[in-house]
Image (cartoon, rainbow, N blue to C red):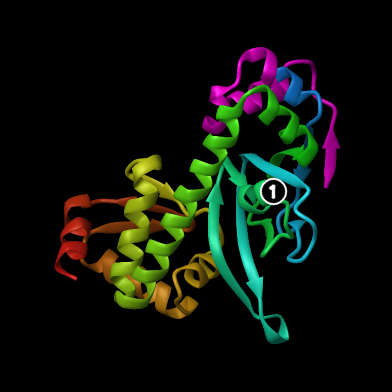
């Protein structure tokens, strides 16, 4: 991890690129940015570990993050995959509790780190910020609940089709997997081999083309029909 020393205005601009901070005035963003740190993390480097005090909010401005839990023997379960721009750990930071899971970088990341006291000061200046952070947290929880329910009920091909369509909503017809395929498979509740077979099945049906981490959606309507028929 490396802490950068950006020129004036860069941190405020990064904050402005995150929708949740759009409610702040330019002056309030500058005040918040004055207390922030901009850091570069290598792939695999941890942002935080489960059980540590949630004393800072991580704002990912470039890269992708894995949120995970580790079980006996170090076995990992990927709970969420987050692509920039994204907030990480807004719920425990708002509540002032420990991080309930760990987070690390699925690829090299640029992250804006906001100490909790700086956020609390921002809340006093603009109460809408706290409400917007809470709204973002509730949206994330809803997405996670829906995702977990779908993972337990759908076939592998349907899970992968649903996930790809979700990525396409923001990336377009050519999507880039935000993490190695084994991590995406873990997030979808699949073994890596099952994930590969599902991709192969969708490819053979003419719905997608695969090029390493990139997936080209050739027949979006076909993927949507697959979901509708499941």
- Residue at the extreme top: 27
Place residue 69 in its image quadrant: bottom right
Residue sitting at x 74%, y 60%: 98
- Please say if 62 is above or below 105: above
**Start and end of the magenta stretch?**
1-29
**Label 1 crowd (10 A; few <14 / some 14-19 / many >=20):** many
Taking the magenta stretch, the answer to whether it contains residue 12 is yes
- Please say if 120 is above or below 204: above
Residue sitting at x 65%, y 21%: 13
Q: Quadrant of the C terminus?
A: bottom left
Taking the magenta stretch, the answer to whether it contains residue 54 is no
Q: Which residue is mark 1?
A: 93
- Residue at the extreme bottom: 73
- Please say if 131 is above or below 97: above
- Please say if 116 is above or below 98: above
Q: Name the foreground residue: 82 vs 25.
A: 25
Q: Is residue 85 visible?
A: no
Relative image position of residue 201 (x, y in whole percent): 28, 72
Place residue 224 in its image quadrant: bottom left
On screen, residue 49 versus residue 87, left or right, reads right
Q: Secondary structure at mark 1?
A: helix
On screen, residue 71 versus residue 161, left or right, reads right
Relative image position of residue 8 (x, y in whole percent): 78, 15
Q: Is residue 43 visible?
A: yes
On screen, residue 106 versus residue 157, left or right, reads right
Q: Name the foreground residue: 100 vs 44.
A: 100
């Amino acid at each position: 991890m490396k802490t950068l020393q950006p020129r004036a205005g860069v941190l405020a601009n990064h904050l402005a690129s995150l929708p949740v901070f759009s409610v702040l005035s330019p002056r309030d963003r500058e005040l918040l940015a004055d207390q922030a740190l901009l850091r570069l993390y290598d792939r695999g480097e941890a942002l935080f570990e489960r059980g540590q005090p949630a004393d800072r909010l991580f704002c990912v401005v470039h890269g992708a993050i894995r949120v995970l839990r580790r079980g006996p023997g170090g076995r990992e379960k990927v709970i969420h995959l987050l692509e920039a721009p994204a907030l990480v750990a807004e719920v425990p930071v708002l509540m002032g509790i420990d991080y309930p899971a760990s987070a690390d970088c699925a690829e090299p990341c640029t992250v804006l780190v906001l100490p909790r006291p700086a956020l609390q000061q921002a809340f006093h200046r603009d109460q809408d910020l706290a409400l917007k952070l809470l709204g973002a947290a509730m949206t994330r929880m809803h997405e996670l609940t829906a995702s977990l329910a779908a993972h337990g009920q759908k076939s592998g091909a349907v899970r992968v089709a649903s996930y790809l369509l979700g990525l396409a909503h923001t990336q377009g017809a050519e999507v880039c997997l935000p993490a190695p395929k084994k991590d995406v498979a873990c997030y979808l509740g699949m073994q890596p081999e099952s994930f590969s077979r599902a991709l192969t099945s969708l490819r053979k049906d003419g719905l997608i083309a695969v090029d390493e981490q990139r997936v080209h959606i050739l027949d979006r309507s076909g993927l949507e029909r697959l979901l509708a028929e499941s």
